[in-house]
Image: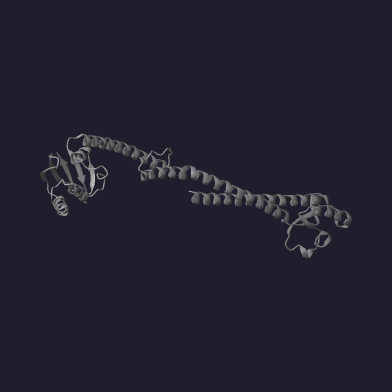
Amino acid sequence: MLFIALPLVSMFSLALFVVFGYVSYKVLRDDLNGKVEQTADINARVLATPFWYLDVDNIESALNAMARDSDIVAVQALGADGTEFAHTGVSQSELADTLRLSRRVYFERNNVRHDVGELVIYFTEERVQNLLLRRIAIDMVLFGLLIAVVAASLLIANKRSIKEPLNRLLHSIRMTKHGRLRRPVEWNSADELGLLIREYNEMVALQGQSQEEAQRKQALLEATLHNIGQGICLFDQDLNLMVWNERYIELLNLPRDLVKEGTPLSDILRFNGERGEYGDVSIQALISDRVAIARRREPYRMERTRPNGRVIQVDHNPMPGGGYVATYT
């Protein structure tokens, strides 16, 4: 979001600054032109006399007064034939890059207009340009501050509206790596991320219900397994012990350090053979024979008498995925 919003805000703000800069320049330029026009109009009327070009001292004083304006660089007074007779300010050779404004000097007698000369004012926009540059510099500083504030706001908003809920969501998902139930994510928003989290919370709720039901059934199964009168054991497809109950240990009188998950069938057979459970036989041959029977994936029933005289019936039933379940009665 930051990489999309920030350029858009920057371009929009820059466009506004450009527009405001142009408007400011136009206003300043219009003010300058209006001021010079007003100066020219007033002085052209004041100096309008039949013999104005004869009162040179008075006219030069008026020209000097006009030239005190920092925007005006030179003022000319021209006679009726266009000849200059009074001048103040920079020389004619320095006026090439200046702006020029002229007003005819005339008077009326008997409703007849009599032109007696021309007043010419030369001025520049240097002050306007310098003022505009200062404003642009200030605007650029403000623009930079605005972008910094917008970027900081977007970063905070990004962390608040995207990063934080995503971190919560990932934390909940990773909880399963540690064997814990996923917890609902505490977040509520109307955007797509809020919708995703709501869907996830619904899934977690259903998963929690399913897992609770599975745990309940597993507890019931374990209670049944350990309270049944028969001895039960389950070996996987590699013939390693996976499940057993207490009655299995009691009937076969097996040590508890031997009966544990992953114990191979051959180890249990060897233990029984070494303590004489199977009589005077070759232990290795017996192990090979019993392992071969276990791998046939065929059900069978057998009885054997333990050295203490107890007769045990063994029912062997193969499982579809490999391995078998045996009951001892």
Vertical arrangement, residue 180 with respect to residue 118, above or below: above
Residue 50, image x and y in percent? 85, 54
Identify the image's colour scheme: rainbow, by chain, secondary structure or one colour. Answer: one colour
Q: Does 120 sit left or right of 8 as displayed?
A: right
Q: Residue at x 52, y 52 (%)?
A: 7
Q: Does 311 sit left or right of 190 as displayed?
A: left
Residue 121, image x and y in percent? 77, 56
Q: Quadrant of residue 313?
A: top left
Q: Would residue 192 be visible to someone looking at this image?
A: no
Q: Residue at x 67, y 49 (%)?
A: 27
Q: How many marks?
A: 0
Q: Nearer the viewer, residue 30 or 133?
A: 133
Residue 53, image x and y in percent? 86, 57
Q: Would residue 193 be visible to someone looking at this image?
A: yes
Q: Quadrant of residue 305?
A: top left
Q: Nearer the viewer, residue 322 or 18?
A: 322
